[in-house]
Amino acid sequence: MQARINTIAFSGLEVLDVDLQVQISSGMPAFNIVGLPDKAVAESKERVRAAFSAVGISFPSERITINLAPANLLKEGSHFDLPIATGILACMKILPQEELSDYIILGELGLDNSIMPVNGVLPVAIKANRDGKGLVCPLSQGSEAVWGGLKNIVATPSLIAMINHFKGNQILPQPVAKQGKPIKNKLDLSDIKGQESAKRALEIAAAGSHNMLMVGPPGAGKSMLASRLTSILPPLSAEEALETCIIHSIAGELKNGELNFNRPYRDPHHNASTPALVGGGKRAKPGEISLAHNGVLFLDELPEFNRATLESLRQPLENGKITVSRAEYHHTYPARFQLIAAMNPCRCGYYSMPGHECTKAPKCALEYQSKISGPLLDRIDIHIHVPQVSPWDIFEKEKGETSETVLKRVINARKIQKDRFIKLNRPELNTNSQLSADILEESVQMQDDAKDFIIKSSERFNLSARGYHRTLRLARTIADLQNEKNVLKMHIAEALNYRRVMPA
């Protein structure tokens, strides 16, 4: 007796076909799984036995062989439980083989025959839709599968419910798409008193999705500013949301099967390892920079991160993707994130502050700041100093603009950018930070005095070619915020003001 079931394996974000072949033959009772299974797949034998017992089906006392083809591809994960159980049921003639061939099946079995959530249902649903097949998945992830464009979804709570559905004894309803609710952000820019220059820089960063570094003493409000960035960022577009949720689905972080339009905000601790930040590890999972795709990555206490870990950010900051290469795998993940970093000027945190004496100055500050390499700093568009806030600002000043007010200006600036990209026949671009050198001159139209000013300033400040281009992109965003068609000298001047490498 033989049966074949369609299932999948993951290679990074890529979904690969797996032909699960089941054979029940005479001989000594045995249950073997071949085809390069990992530990989780090998352990599925016991979960399948227990699930059969829970629904009252006698497990075959014959020789069972499961082959996962292609045999040279490593099979990882618990999602093979349900395909294995389904294949055995098809061999036993309990389920119809012909009907099952029209489905891709995945799910993890509990000992009580319940079917539990697994990673990657959304990208599998997209593949099933592209291949013209249906999908059998856990009930709790049925709404996630709907976002893949599928109309033929069997979202089942248990093994017995799936059996009854295919035998015609029970009809499982089609799941309904769920959309995550917009976060009602209690954090508002108006909560921050003082720091007007820092809030101005934050608005520019939001409008053009520019990377930003804040340097200042402890308690100045750097973390408060970073945490409020998402309150002035527009929600994800449908395309961005789907792209982002695919990554979160693979990583097992997509909650309740809902497509989320809130921009990701990731803030890993400074002891995070390189694989945790950029991706990798035993299962080559996406790292924090990929989970922050189309959103914000906040690195607090920047110099406290491992030097090699920070240097690994260079490639994704330029290319918007990260390639993780190891002996057994080679995966590329999207990683177009907005980096917001914060640090103290020195180890004690009070370098050059009135009333605070640093006994090791300036050596303490130089050593601490040198932990951040020049090439990494060159990839950060906005460098600002966040000074200590005086008690007068805290108790006497009125609240400033709300996030809602600033968000309107940010949305308008982004619309101007998007319209410009469409006219330049580059609709895939969204913000000025993505401007490539080939269309930079067309996008940044300057008057003669502005051209002279940036050329002379580049020579004076010894800007690299990357620094020159990033200054132009930043000036373009500043002009867009002011609804200016051309980049003026004052826009260049403000952009150059943010190119300070390390404020004292």
Image (spheres, grey):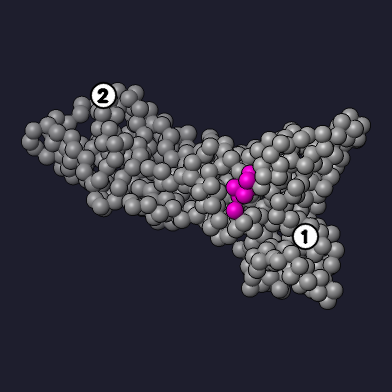
* Left or right, 347 with reference to 88: right
Up/down of 437 relative to 195, above or below: below
- Which amino acid, mark 2? Ser
Q: What label does residue 53 carry, if any?
A: 2
Residue 132 visible in image: no
The residue wearing badge 1 is 495
Stretch of the chain drawn in magenta: 367-373
Taking depth in this image into account, of 263 and 103 the one nearest to the observer is 263
Local secondary structure at mark 2:
helix
Counting other residues with Cα less than 10 Å from the Cα at mark 1, is it few (<14), some (14-19), or many (20 or more)?
many
Q: CA distance from mark 1 to mark 2?
A: 69 Å
Residue ranking furthest to the left: 27
Which residue does the image show at 33% across and 42% down from the upper left? 76
Residue 183: quarter of image: top right
- Which amino acid, mark 1? Ala
Q: Earlier in the sequence, mark 1 or mark 2?
A: 2
Counting other residues with Cα less than 10 Å from the Cα at mark 2, is it few (<14), some (14-19), or many (20 or more)?
some
Taking depth in this image into account, of 480 and 495 the one nearest to the observer is 495
Mark 1 or 2: the one toward you = 1
Taking depth in this image into account, of 159 and 211 the one nearest to the observer is 211
Residue 372 lies in the magenta-colored region: yes
Which residue does the image show at 26% across and 24% down from the upper left? 53
